[in-house]
Amino acid sequence: MKYPYIIIFLIVNSFSLNIKSQETGCPVIRNYTVQEYKNEPQVLCCIQGQNGLMYFGVSGEIMEYDGVNWRSFSIDNQEVPYGFAMDKKGKIYVAANNEFGYIHVDKKGFKR
């Protein structure tokens, strides 16, 4: 009669050992200062393209971040971008004050 209780005790304790062995991780978060990306402190919108690049809307410009380098390119009439959207093909549209368009890459690789 003692053996069934011992077997049940061992089974229950083996489950608790598996639960304790799992680790909880912390996400890697990196905050960039204004001095690092050399632009305005207020970022109004952001999106990640299908190519993995991040795009940020800052006053009058769109900043692109590839994980190492920051690049910025201006919007026509220096308008403030307020939102991004992406279609199924990966084209990124930009909504700005009195402007609407998309990010276009020309033959030399410059974005406008």
Image (spheres, rainbow, N blue to C red):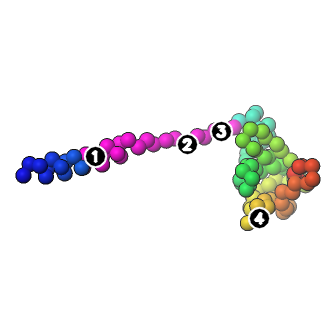
Q: Nearer the viewer, mark 1 or mark 3?
A: 1
Q: Which residue is at 79% across, 61% downward?
A: 91
Q: Which residues are magenta?
A: 12-32
Upstream in the sequence, badge 1 or badge 2? 1
Q: CA distance from mark 4 to mark 2?
A: 30 Å
Could you say which disc has been placed on residue 31 in the image? 3
Q: Give the class, few, some or many, for how many residues have Cα within 10 Å of label 3's Cα (few <14, many ≥20).
A: few
Upstream in the sequence, badge 3 or badge 4? 3
* Kind of element beneath mark 2: loop
Could you say which disc has been placed on residue 61 in the image? none
> Would you say residue 77 is visible in this rendering?
no
Could you say which disc has been placed on residue 27 in the image? 2
Q: CA distance from mark 1 to mark 4?
A: 50 Å
Could you say which disc has been placed on residue 89 in the image? 4
**Residue at numbered disc 1:** 14
Q: CA distance from mark 3 to mark 4?
A: 30 Å
Q: Nearer the viewer, mark 4 or mark 2?
A: 4
Q: Nearer the viewer, mark 3 or mark 4?
A: 4
> Would you say residue 43 is visible in this rendering?
yes
Tell me: residue 36, above or below residue 27.
Answer: above
Q: Which residue is at 69% across, 37% downward?
A: 32
Q: Which residue is at 92% across, 49% downward?
A: 108
Identity of the amino acid at label 1?
Ser
Q: For the view shown, which residue lies furthest in the bottom direction? A: 88
Residue 70 in the image, given as x and y percentages of width and height: 78, 40
Q: Give the class, few, some or many, for how many residues have Cα within 10 Å of label 1's Cα (few <14, many ≥20).
A: few
* Kind of element beneath mark 4: loop
Upstream in the sequence, badge 1 or badge 4? 1
